[in-house]
Image (cartoon, rainbow, N blue to C red):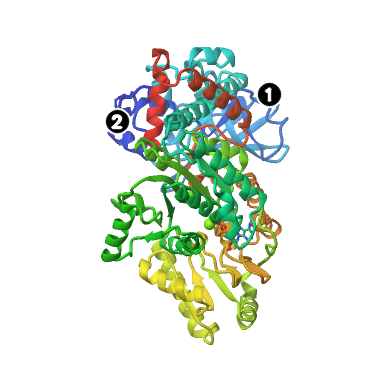
Amino acid sequence: MTTNTTDIKYLKGVGEKKAECFKKLGIDTVGALLRFFPRTYEDWSNPVKAYDCQMDSTVCIKAKIVTPITEQKVRANMTIYKFAISDGSGEVFVTIFNNKFLASRLHFGSEYLFYGKLTGGNWARQMSSPEISEVSSGGIRPIYRAVRGLPSKTIERIVKNALVANIGEDPIPEEIRAKHKLCDLRFAIENIHFPRSYDALKRARERLVFEELFIFQTAFMLIKERNKKETEYIITNNCKDEFLKQLPFSLTSAQNRVIDECLADMTNGRLMNRLVQGDVGSGKTAVAAALCFIAARNGYQAALMAPTEILAVQHYKTLSGLLEPLGISCGLLTGSTSKKEKKEISFTVSSGETSVLIGTHALLSDNVEFKNLALVITDEQHRFGVAQRARLSEKGQSVHTLVMSATPIPRTLGLVIYGDLDVSIIDEYPKGRQQIESFCVTGKLRQRVYNYIKKHLDEGRQGYIVCPLVEESETADIASAVEYCERLKTKDFKNYTVDILHGKQTAKQKDEVMGRFNKGELQLLVCTTVVEVGIDVPNATIMVIENAERFGLSQLHQLRGRIGRGEHKSSCILISDIEDGKTKERLDVIKNNTDGFKIADEDLRLRGPGDFLGNRQHGLPRFNIADIYSDLSVLKTAGDEARNLISNNFNLNDDKYKALRLEIAELYKKL
Ligand code: ADP
Ligand code: MG
C-alpha cells in the first residue's frame, strides 16, 4: 500500500487483542483499515415519523423519552428496561434487554435517534432493542463486515480515529483525475466511511471504483508491454495446407481464422502472446496441432503442455497420429515417464530430433534442454491465473506463447482477465456435433436414472457418473465417491464394469483406469471432477451429475462437454434435491443452453460477480469495491486511460506516477 503502513495496533482504540481480530479481517495496517470499506450503510440522516411509516419496517426516528426508564429483572441473567418515546406523531414503547450501560446513559426528557424495526399495531407501536444515538451523531452510518470481538460499531469508532492519520498519495495521476472529475483521495476515503450525503457517497465510490479498475488494468498493460519483444523465431514457410491435406476433417472457419491470427503473430518478428478461447468441443487441439506442425516444418521445436497426465497422454496420441505421418517426431514427457525414457527423450529433444514435445506443466521446469524451442502452447489454462502468466513473463521466456482456455468467460470480463494477452475466439463448433439432451431430476428418480444408464450401456455405449461434492475438503469428497462407487459395483451395476477416477489416485492408477475406459473395457466411470478437463471418449453418451446444484454453471458445462463427442445421441442428467427457485433457475440454464459463452453470461447474472469470481477459477483477484458487472462503463473508461498512459509512459518513470507504481507492485504481489 502506498497508504499508511503503520501497524494497526498503534491506532487509538486498538490493542493487541483487537489487532488480532482485525487480522482475521485481513487488516494489519492503518492503510488497510482505511481501505476496508463498509459493506452497507444505515440511514440516520432522515428520521421519519413513527406513525407515518409502514409497520415492520426498519426506520430511524428522532424522539424524546417521555416516561421514566423502568428496570425489571425477569430472570437471573435477564434484565429488561422499558420506556416510551414520542416524536409528536404518537408514543412508541421501547424495550432494551440486558444493556445496563446503555440504559444508564439515557435520560427522561432528552431527545435521541432510535434506529430499529417498528412493530405492534396502529394504536401502540413498539421498538425492541433499537440502536440509540445522540441526535448529533446522525447521518449516513457505515456498517462493516464484523467478526467476533469486533462489532461494526467498534470498527466504526476506530476508523474515525484512523481518518486523522496520513492516507498517503493519490495513485490516480492528477490529469486523469481532473479529466474525469474524480474527487481526491481524502474526500473519497472520508466519504466512503462517513458520507456527508448520498451524493458525496456516490462520488467517493465512483472514484474508488475507478482507482481500483485503473490500477488493475494498468498493471496488466504493463505486463503486455513487457512481453512485446522482438524475436528471431520467425515463421517464413506457411505450410498450413500441407497439414490440412492430411487432416481427416476440414477445419471450421473459426479454427482457420484462429490459426491465421497466430501465424500473423509469428511471421512479423514480434513474440506472440495470445489466448485462444474456445468452448469445449470447439476443436482447440487441431489448432494446436497445426501450429506445432508449422513451427516444426520451419525448423523449430514446439511444446504442448496440459494440466493433467491423462490429457497429456491424450494429446500425445492425437498429435503423433497427425504429425508423425508428415515426418514430424513427437515425444511425451510426464511425471510417470520412467527415468530411462526420460533420458532418451531429453537426448532427442536436445539434439532436435524430437520436434514436438508434449507433457504436463512440469515439462518446462524439468530441465529439458531444447535445441531451438520457439513455441509453447498451454492447454486448459483456465486453472492458471494472471499470476502464473505474470511469472512466466518475468522469467523472460522469449518464445511464442499460446494459451488455450476452455472456460468461456463473459466477453466483458475477458477484457479484464486477459488484458495482458491478445485474444482469439473459436466461436463455432465442428459440423455434425450432436446436441446433448439435458434433464433435471430429483434423487427420487435415481433408480430410473440408473435404468436409463443401463439402457445406454446395453447398447454398447459408455457413461459417467459425476460424484457429489459433499464437503469443502477433497479428502472427504473422495471418501464418499469411493463409497458411492463400491455401492454401484456391488449392487446397482453389479453386472457391468465400473470403476472410479479421482484426484488423489496416482498417475499410474489414473492411466490404468482411463486406459480401460478408452478401450471400452470399462462401461461406467464414476468420477470426481477430474473428468472436467479434456477427456475425449466419443463412445461415452451418458452422464449423470449428482448434487448438481453444488457445481458452478461453467463447471457443469465443462463436465457435460465430455459427452456428445461421437456419432451417437447423448444425454446428461442433473440430479438435485434442492427445489428452491434459484437452484431451479440455475439448472435450467444448463438444461436450455449449450453455448458456453451464453452460460457464462447467465452464471454471472445469476450469481453476481462476487460469487462468480469468488471461486477463483478465472484467476482474477477479488475486487475490493468495484463490481465489474455494474461498473462496466467505468471498467472501459479506466481501461482506456490505462492504455493511454502506458503507451505514452511505458515505464511510469516520472515521479508523479510513484504512488501508482507502488500500488501496481503491491498488486503483483497479491496475484
Ligand atoms: P476442445 O476444444 O474441447 O479441446 P477437441 O480439440 O478435443 O476440442 O475437439 C473435439 C472433437 O472434435 C475431437 O474429437 C476432434 O477430433 C473433433 N474436431 C475438431 N475439429 C473438427 C472439425 N473441424 N471437424 C470435425 N471434427 C472436428
Ligand atoms: Mg481440449
Residue 600: x percent and y percent? Answer: 62, 48
The numbered dot on residue 88 is: 1
The numbered mark, 1 or 2, whose residue comes first in the sequence reads 2
| The N terminus lies in quadrant | top left
- Pointer 2 residue: 15
Local secondary structure at mark 2:
loop
Q: Residue at x 26, y 65 (%)?
A: 340
Residue 26 in which image quadrant: top left
Of 372 and 89, the residue lying toward us = 372
Local secondary structure at mark 1:
loop
Q: Which residue is drawn at 57% across and 73% down?
A: 463
Amino acid on which disc 1 is placed: Gly
Q: Outermost residue toward the bottom?
A: 495
From the viewer's perspective, is 602 left or right of 276? Answer: right
**Would residue 134 be seen by someone viewing this image from the given angle?**
no
The numbered dot on residue 158 is: none
Is the distance from the Cβ of mark 1 to the nearest ligand 1 atom less than 8 Å? no
Of 276 and 19, the residue lying toward us = 276
Amino acid on which disc 2 is placed: Gly
572 versus 252 height, above or below: below
Of 327 and 522, the residue lying toward us = 327
453 versus 627 height, above or below: below
Q: Which residue is drawn at 32% across and 64% down?
A: 337
From the viewer's perspective, is 72 left or right of 604? Answer: left
Dot 1, how many residues are within 10 Å of its Cα: few (below 14), some (14-19), or many (20+)? Answer: few
Residue 583: x percent and y percent? Answer: 63, 56
